[in-house]
Image: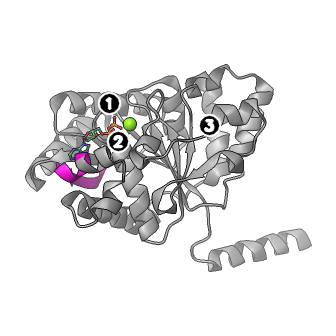
Amino acid sequence: MLDQASKLREKMQNQDKKDIKQTRVITVTSGKGGVGKSNFTLNFALSLMDQGKKVVIFDVDLGLANIDVLMGVSSKYSILEMIENQKSIWDIMEKGPGDLEYIAGGSGFNQLMRLDEDQLDYFFHQLEQLQGYTDIILMDTGAGISRESLRFILSADDVILVTTPEPTSLTDAYAVIKMVHGLDPAAVFRLVVNRVTSLKEGKHTADKIAMVASQFLGVDIDRLGYLPDDDHVMRAVKKQIPFYLQYPQSMASQGIRRMAEVYLRGKDELDEAKGMKGFVDRLKNWMKLT
Ligand SMILES: Nc1ncnc2c1ncn2[C@@H]1O[C@H](COP(=O)(O)OP(=O)(O)O)[C@@H](O)[C@H]1O
Ligand SMILES: [Mg+2]
């Protein structure tokens, strides 16, 4: 009885603390590669930070591991090394420009699923340490649907799907929706149309995907927004400085800022975040099922 009362009190106290840190896990994905997913992830993170959120990027884009290249830093450690050398998640967390913290998956991240049970437990345990440390974890997953990114998508609180208006990018984005929906009909997608030449083109592109998804799968696609095709992005990539920091007044930065606002404003309407623990539980589950 006493126990129940104290639990209730605790719950109420937590509700009082308006913005309690129930870490929200967002995976960013795309059908096709090269659509601007890593640039979106990095600059969206910086903009969320600008708006008062604590964000950690988790770079699980295999092979190219390009978030660090975009930031002009090279990561010393990766998740795989953390597991193999029994390091903690704090040991491998690094800081980029604007004090953005990130964790590199490392090029061997796709070996994750070949780990033995003890190693996996260690990995999960380290991930859970992030609970409460940060408001948002942004995961940049690889393009296309590898088994690993599929599991991360299915386990996240939100999925942001990046596409461009190109037909190939669109059909690949649709393939992602279809595949994820097939495994989890409740999955919600938030669409970002990148490299649009006009607002109209952005809307038109989003309409097309939304229509097909609704017609053939009965899935509602939520729109996060449109990002203009902007030379500043390429220039910033060459300089290895995030465009949001290097060109804060560029169209691309303004677009990112708007999206971060939209995301944070709409957050109350989204399902409650399950936190890092919830993410890890779901990940464990999906590893058994997929
Ligand atoms: N909004 C944009 N405007 C202009 N060029 C862009 C934009 N977004 C991305 N790019 C270009 O596309 C390239 C690939 O972007 P990147 O974020 O690495 O894609 P992905 O992670 O999807 O493979 C960038 O180096 C940049 O030159
Ligand atoms: Mg990338």
Residue at 46% x, 58% y is: 97
Tell me, for residue 37, which label it has, or none.
2
Residue type, label 3: Ser
- Residue 232, magenta (yes or no): yes
Q: Secondary structure at mark 3?
A: loop
Secondary structure found at label 2: helix
Q: Residues within 10 Å of mark 1 (few under 14, many from 20)?
A: some
Dots 2, 1 in contact, CB < 8 A: yes
Question: What is the x, y in percent for residue 145?
Answer: 42, 26
State the residue position of label 3: 78
Q: Which mark is residue 33?
A: 1
Magenta residues, as a range? 220-234
| Residue 260, image quadrant | bottom left
Q: Which quarter of the rendering shows the C terminus?
A: top right
CB of mark 2 within 8 Å of CB of mark 3?
Answer: no
Residue 1 visible within the image: no
Residue 78: give x, y in percent of width and height: 62, 37
Q: Position of residue 119 (x, y in %)?
A: 76, 29
Is residue 67 in view from this perspective?
yes
Label 2 CB-ligand 1 distance < 8 A: yes
